[in-house]
Amino acid sequence: MVRVVIKLIMTDHDGVIVDSSEDVYLALWELMTDHSFGRRPPSFLDFLQFFRPPGDEWFARYGFDFPADKIAETLRCAPEKSPMFPTVPSLLARIHELKLPIVVISAGDQSRIEKQLGVGRVLHFFEFVVGESEDKAREIDSLCSVFSINPVEAVYIGDRPSDMESGREAGVTAIGFTDDRPVMEKALIKAGAQHCVKDHHELGELLAQLAS
């Protein structure tokens, strides 16, 4: 079997670059508790394992019915003050040493993502920042074409099952970032992750292996 060497790195932003998972969940939790009427909001673990954007089906699963624009606004505002993981700059410096292009593909606001990357002084590491993506699989495929790279020569890094599904659909190697939450590894692998890493150090090691 011929081993493929990766030539392009694509990553989600929220949950991989900025530590936003709890902020997003708390915003959704507050929305649900304000309209609970005796219903019990799902746990953070349920959110991590089963939430899929745009969120309508997830809310319905627990008996909540919110307008799509209300959900979208909550998701848009929640990560605005999320801090960057402190280990991200060292990860990006290592990727720079590998001489591989890296791109952000995210459903989050374009301006907010660029601002957070700028505040963290890492924006210059990225070739492109693609925000407000409604179809990550399509964006992944498009970016592979831009770089004239076969999808099998690229990776997509994400922290959610939906990210793994997008990577699998696009034909790239899907890497799950668990943020040291062991229960997430099973959920990410089930969704299509070929690799799972618990932190940015492990991610850097894996990318170096895949690129050599």
Image: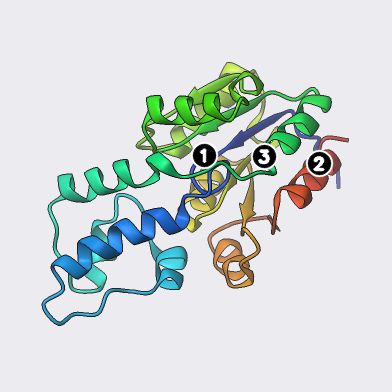
Direction from residue 72 to residue 194 in the image, left or right? right
Residue at the image position 21 percent from the left and 60 percent from the top: 31
Compared to 38, does 97 lie above or below? Answer: above
Q: Which residue is the site of mark 1?
A: 13
Direction from residue 174 to residue 37 in the image, left or right? left
Q: Amino acid at mark 3?
A: Val
The x and y percentages for residue 36 are 16, 73
The x and y percentages for residue 9 are 67, 33
Examine the image and state in which quarter residue 93 appears: top right
**Label 3 secondary element:** helix
Assign the C terminus to one quadrant of the image.
top right
Judging depth in this view, the residue of 7 and 207 nearest the camera is: 207
**Label 2 secondary element:** helix
Badge 3 crowding class, 10 Å Cα cut-off, few under 14, some 14 to 19, many 20 or more, is: some
Residue at the image position 78 percent from the left and 41 percent from the top: 207
Compared to 47, does 208 lie above or below? Answer: above
**How many angstroms separate mark 2 from mark 1 (CA)?**
21 Å
For marks 2 and 3, give the one nearer the viewer. 3
Q: Do the residues bearing badges 2 and 1 touch, measured as CB atoms within 8 Å?
A: no
Q: Which residue is the site of mark 3?
A: 88
Of labels 1 and 3, earlier in sequence is 1
Q: Which residue is the site of mark 2?
A: 210
